[in-house]
Image (tube, coloured by chain):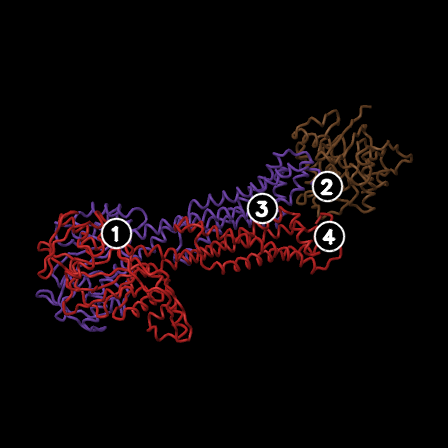
Chain colours: A purple, B red, C brown
Amino acid sequence: MKSMFWRILSGSLSRRKGRIAASVGAIALGVSLVVASVSLHQGIRGKVAEELKNYGANLVLLPANGTAPFLKEKDIGNLAVQGVKDRLIAHAPFLYQVVKIQGRDVVLAGTRFAAVKTVSPWWQVEGSWPEGKEAALVGLNVASKLGLRRGDRISAAYKASRMTFTVSGFLRTGGPEEHQIFVDLEASQLLTGRHGLLSAVLVSARAEGALDETAAFLRRTWPEADVRTLWQVARAEEALLSRIEVFLMSVSVIILFASGLGVFATMTTAALERKVEVALMRALGAGENRIAFIFACEALAIGLVGGMAGFALGFLFAEAISLSVFGSFIFPSLISAPTGLAVGIGVALFSSLSVVRKVARTATAAVLKGE
Amino acid sequence: MLGRLLLKSLWRQKSRTLLVLLSVGTAATLISAFLSIAFTITERMAQEMRSFGANIILVPKAEPLEVEIAGLKYVAPEEAAYLDEPDLAKIKTIFWRHNIVSFAPFLSRVVQFQGRPVLLVGTWFEREISIPEGKRLFSFAGGSKREVATAKGTFRAGVRSLAPWWQVEGRWLREGEEGILLGSAVARALKVGVGSSIPLSYEGKLALVPVKGIVRTGGSEEDQILADLEFTQKLFSLPGKVDKIQVSALATPDNALAIRANRIKPAKLSPQDYETWYCTPYLGSIIYQLEEALPNAKGKAIRQVSEAEGAFLAKMRLTLVLIAAVALFVASLAVMATMVAAIFERRQEIGLMKALGAERSQVGFLFLLEGSVSGLLGGLLGYGAGMALARFLLARTFSMAGAGVALPLEWVILPCTLLLAVSVALLGAFFPVREAMRLDPVRTLRGIG
Amino acid sequence: MVPLIVLKDVIRDYNGKVRALDRVSLEICPGEWVAVMGASGSGKTTLLNMIAALDQPSSGLLLVDGIDLVSLTEEDRARFRREKVGLIFQQFHLVPYLTALENVMLAQYFHSMADSDEAAQALGLVGLEDRAAHLPSELSGGEQQRVCIARALINEPKIILADEPTGNLDAKNEDVVMGIFQDLHRAGHTLLFVTHDPHIGGQADRIIELNHGRLLPATSHAEGEPPVRALRDIA
C-alpha cells in the first residue's frame, strides 16, 4: 500500500500537470542556457585553436648552426615520436635552391603540396594545385616578370642538370612566396642532387599550452634542428585564446545569474499559489519542518527532471552553435552537467522553501480566510 | 478610471509587479547586452589583432623579382623600383583613414660585414608625421557626397606601433640617428654586443656604425640588421626612396559584395554597389583607396594574416549572435511563464470584473495594457542594465575604458529591446487572460476554479 | 462538569491599535454546541482562531482541555491542533490534487499514521463512501464540505471548530450539512460555530454574541428542539 507521503507527492506531480510542466520548463530553459554557455566556454578553446592554425605555421625548423647546412629528410620521423605528435597539427618540408630559369635567378622551392595545404591554408592558387613531379606552382610576381601563363613549360637549370616543369597555377600570398616557384620535393631534390635533404620544416603546433614547451621538446628530440617559434603568430593565438576564454567565462557567470533569477521568478509565482495549501497543512497541525520536507521533495523532483531536460537541451544548443560556427561538434563539457543540475535543484528548492517560510511568517488563519 | 485602475493594480500588488518587471528586465538585459557586445566585440577583436602585425603591404607597381637565399634578398639592379618617402603621409588621407592603425616604410639591401653578407633594413622606428588636417569630400557617381574629417594633424607611425611585440635590449634608435639594432640571431652569430661599433660595407662604401641595441622579434628580423631609414638611404645612395610599406588596417570580414569586388574590377560594380563597397572598410576597398592615394604603388593583402583574421572574426561574431539568439529565446519563454503565472493568480479579479458586467474586450484591454506597461518598464530597466553589463564585460575582457565607451548601435538596440520586451510580455499575457475569461465567474470568485 | 474551554479576560490587539477581542471571558463544557454570532468585524473569527491555536491572546487566560494555549511554543501549538481540534472552513480548503479519501488521510498523516480504511469509514459517516476516489473539483460544494467534516472528525478531536461552514452552500446542502452537525452533537461532540445566520445559530445549545470585541450578555437558547434526523436519511 502506498504511503501517504507518496500519495501527496504523486498526486501533486501527476494532477497538477500544467503547473508542474511550467516549473519544469522554466528550470529546463534556465539550465539549458547555463549548460550551453559552460559547454561553449569549455569547448571553444580547442575550436578556436583549430581555427587559429589558419594563422599558419608557428614553428620553423632550420639546420642548426655549426652542423650540416641541411636537415635530413629521414629525421622528420622525430616529429612523430610520442609526446610530440599530439602537439602538432601539420608540418611541411621545404628545400630551397636558386636556379636559372630563362636566364634569370629564381628561387625554386621543393615541398609536399598536400602538407602545405594544411600548414599554409591562406595560399590562394589561381589555376590548380600541381600534381605529379612535373608540375609547378608559380608565384604571381615570378609569373609577371617571366611572362608565364598556365600550361607554359619552363626549364630550370642547376649546375649541369636541367628539368622541365609545366605551370599548373599561380600563387597569391602577399608574402615572399610570390617571388618563388614551387615544385614537388623529389623533383627539386633530383634537380639539385640533394637527395634526402631539406632546408626547413614549417610546423603548425597546437597553441593551447605553452608553445615554448613544444619547441624545447623538439630541440631535444631533433638536436640537428634549430627550432624557432614564430612569435607573431604564437602571440596572437595565445592572447586571443585567453581573452576569449575570459569573455566566455564572464558570459557564463552572467547567464548563470540571469537564468537563476528568471527561474526563481517563475518558480516563486508558481509556488505562491500554494500559500493556501501550506496554510491548510499548518492548520491541520503539521509542523513547519514536515511541510518543508514535502515541498522540498517535490522541488527536488522538479529540479531533477528540469535539470536533466535542461542539460539535454543546453547540450543541443551548444552543439547547434558549434556545428553552425565551426562545422563540427564540441566535446560535451563534464562540468556542465553537475552545474546545470545544481542550478536547477538549487533554484527549485530555494523558491519553494521560501514560500513555506513566507507563509510561516504570516498568520495562517488570515491566509485561510482569504485575506 | 482606466489609468487609475492600472496604477492601483500595479502599485497594490508590488511583489507581483516586481516579479514581472524582474523577469522582463532580466530578459531585456540579456538581449541588449548581447546585441551590443556582438556588434562591438568583433571590432574590438579586430583592433586587438592589429597589434599582431601588418595586414597590407604596398610595393612599387613594377615590383622587382626578389631572390631570397638564406634570408638574404637580392634584386637585379636594372629592375629595382621604389616608392617615394614623402608620399607616406597620403596613407592617412584616404576615405578609411581612421582605420589605418599604423604603417612603416622599409628599404633593405644585402651589405657585407667582415666578408659575410647580411640584410640591412632601414625603417621608421617611431616617427611623428604631420598629415593634412581638416575635411575631405568624397563624391560618388550616384551624386551622393560623403565627408571625412581629420581632427589631429599628426600621426605616430613606425615599427614600434606596427609591431609592438618587438623587444629591444639596449635602446631604440632615434629619428635620423646613425646607429643600428642587431637581430638577436645576428648578434649571436657575430658575437657582437651593445656598445661596440661594427663596419658595414656596401658597394665599396664603408660605414662604422655603433650597435645601440639587440632586437627580439620572433620573426625573420632576427637575422637582419635594422637601421633608421635615413641612414640606409644615404648608404645605398637612394635619398627619399623606400621599397615597401607595411600597413596595419582595421578591416571588416569580407561578404558577398567584397568577394565580388575582388573578382571583378571595382570600377565594374554598379554605382550603388561601388559606393557601398567603397564606404565599407573591407580589406579590398582599403587597398584600393591606398592605391588611389599612391598611384605608383601596388597593394597586396598579407593573406596569412588577413585570411585568418577575417574568418576568425566572422566566426566569433556568429558565435555571439547565436548565444544571443538562444538567450533571447529562453528569456522570452521565461517572461511568458511569469506573465502566465501572474495573471493566473488574478483569476478572481477577472471573474469579479465579468460578474460586474465588464465586456470581454474591456477586461482583455486592461490586462494587455498592464502587460505592455510592464514590458515597457522592464525593457527600459533591462536596456540600462544591459548596456552597463556590456560595458563591464568589454572593460574586463578587452580592457576598454569602463563607462566612457560609446557602444555602437545603441540607438538600434533600444527600440529592438523595447519592442521585444513588450511583445513577449503581451504574448505571455494573452493566453492566460483568454483562459481566465472562459472560466465561470462564480466558481473563480469562490476560489474553487 | 469541568469546562473544556476556559477564556478569562482575553484581549487580542493587532499592531497595538485594533482591539479584536476585549476582555472576553467564556466557558464551554464538553458536549456543548455553541454558536458565535455578531456583525462583520465583531471578533467572531478571532475568537475561533484563538481556540484553534491559530492565534494567540495579547493577554488573558486561555485553557483548552486543561492546556494553557498562551504559553505554548509553535511546535506545541501544531501538535495541539492535530490532536485536539477539527477545523472546518467556509472555503472548504481541500487540497485540489488529492482525492476525497486522500484529503481525509492527510489529516491522519499529520496526526499519526494514515489509514485508508479508517478514512473510508469517516467518509461513510458523511455519506460519501462512493465518492472516495473523486477529486474536489469533481464534487459539489455540499460534498466538499462533507469531506471537510470527515477530515475534521478523523482524528477524534475534543472540539470541532467551524467558521461559517454553510456560508458557501445552497439551502439544500446547508440542510444536509447541518443534519450531520446535529448527529455529531447528539453523539456527544463539542461544537463551536461562527455564523452570522440566525437560522444556523438557532440550532445550537447556546448563542454568544460579540459586538466590537465584547461579549454581550449571554443569550440563553430558545426552547424548541431542532428537528432530528438519522444520518442515513441525509445520505
Circle 2 crowding by C-alpha within 10 Å: few under 14, some 14–19, many from 20: some
The front one of A36 and C160 is A36
Residue B78 drawn at (x, y percent): 14, 70
Query: What percent of the width, then of the height, locates residue C20?
Result: 76, 35
Does dot 2 land on a helix, a strand or a loop?
helix
> In 3D space, how far apart are the residues under numbered discs 4 and 2 (Cα atoms)?
18 Å
* Badge nearest the viewer, 4 or 3: 4
- Which tag is nearer the camera, tag 3 or tag 1? 1
Q: Which mark is residue A267?
A: 3
Q: Earlier in the sequence, mark 1 or mark 4?
A: 1
B84 lies above or below A49: below
Where is mark 1, residue-wise?
A: B166
For mark 4, what is the residue?
Answer: B352
Tag 3: residue type? Met
Amino acid carrying mark 2 in the image: Lys
Q: Is residue B169 above or below residue C194?
A: below
